[in-house]
Image (cartoon, rainbow, N blue to C red):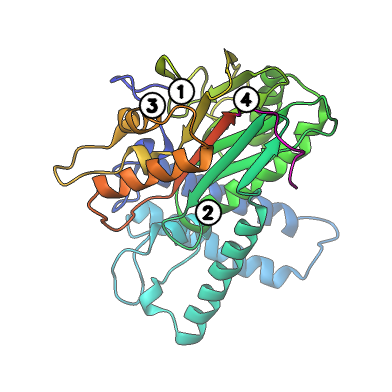
Amino acid sequence: MQESDGTAATPARIMEGEETTMGGTADAYLREQLEKRRDELKSAISSPAPAMPVSPLLDLLGEVDSAMQRMEQGSYGICEGCHDPVEKDRLLADPLTRLCIGCLTQEEQRALERDVELASSIQRGLLPQTDVRFRDWQIHYQYHPAGLVSGDYCDVISPSTEDGKLIFLVGDVAGKGIGASLLMTHLHAMFRSLSGAGHDLEKLLEIANSVFCESTTASQYATLICGQAGMSGEIEFVNAGHLPALVITKEGVEQFGSTGLPLGLFKTSRYQVTRVQLDPGDSLLLYTDGISETRGPAEKEYGADGLARVAGERHGWPPHEIAAACIRDVKNYSANARQSDDQTLMIIHRADVAGSALND
């Protein structure tokens, strides 16, 4: 998806302006979540044979009704202890939250910390190997969350047969914190499940989008690039509302923008495949907005052009060296300021010699 200025409509851009208010997409999502919980509770209470005692269900229903009443009165999202705003990511994870972190007991804070650490551990365990080789393909990625958990999505899926295609994905889900990490985990499981069915890319993305729409709410979506690397240097990929992909050849760097809407917006979305041929030494570079939207001292964004400049000067270099140079340049551009968003960068490189068997 493109904005009026031609830039990709990433989750960070769409969610911009909602950090201190509960309006817009965040408010619509929370209202939808509360209404969904209310309907499910009413259905469970009215069931001829409830799966659990009715009393706790009625208590939960009362909490949901109270939250919706506070939303109507404009007091929803305000801590009942200190009257400051409750952290948005905590509300997105649990719409019934009524206290900010500072007003939790020490025991409650420790339990929350344990939950976040567990989510972080699970998320790290889902990442693929940092360096993958298959035939003459080499893939390397750098994955740097801004906090313990990340909303960036990164995966490499090996083919089931020697003549199969290597699948790679880089994406960014809407929101931040544990809620975003849960969506990332959902994407990981979904594509891992669908990738073995033998669908072409158009069909794979259509099915994934349909499943994502059915299993998430209206405000949950993800931008991503999903691609396949073939046997003779051919690469095909779909850009679903994500930032431009960069193809680095000896002639220069070419940018390939979005060809479809993010996953999760419309169930009937269709996706167009981009096909490129990489010669030995050429690379495809994918990244998330935590890199391109890094700001320098003058508050100007680093942008895709910054990556194109650094990667273009290093055509033919091993992928891990290209990635390291890009990340180093981003840090220098921001004067080593504290990282404010998740950063992921992946290089799909065609080597000069045949690669070894896949390392996984």
> Are the residues flagged by discs 2 and 3 in contact, CB closer than 8 Å?
no
Residue 177: give x, y in percent of width and height. Answer: 47, 57
Amino acid type of the residue tagged 2 in the rendering = Gly
Side of 282 relative to 163 (left or right) = left
Q: Nearer the viewer, residue 256 or 341?
A: 256
- Residue 248 circle label: 1
- For image coordinates 35% across by 69% down, the residue present is 79
Disc 1 crowd rating (10 Å Cα; few below 14, some 14-19, many 20+) is many
- Helix, strand or loop at label 3? It is helix
- For image coordinates 47% across by 29% down, the residue present is 242
Amino acid type of the residue tagged 4 in the rendering = Lys
- Helix, strand or loop at label 1? It is strand
> Are the residues flagged by discs 4 and 3 in contact, CB closer than 8 Å?
no
> Are the residues flagged by discs 1 and 4 in contact, CB closer than 8 Å?
no
- Mark 2 or mark 3, which is nearer to you? 3
Q: Which residue is mark 4?
A: 267
Look at the image and give the residue range highlighted in magenta.
Answer: 351-360
Residue 351: give x, y in percent of width and height. Answer: 61, 29
Q: Which residue is mark 2?
A: 179
Side of 194 relative to 39 (left or right) = right
Q: Residue furthest bottom?
A: 106
Side of 173 relative to 353 (left or right) = left
Q: Quadrant of the N terminus?
A: top left
Q: Nearer the viewer, residue 1 or 323?
A: 323
Please say whether residue 214 is visible from this viewpoint.
Answer: yes
- For image coordinates 77% across by 71% down, the residue present is 53
Amino acid type of the residue tagged 3 in the rendering = Gly
Res 23 quadrant in image: top left
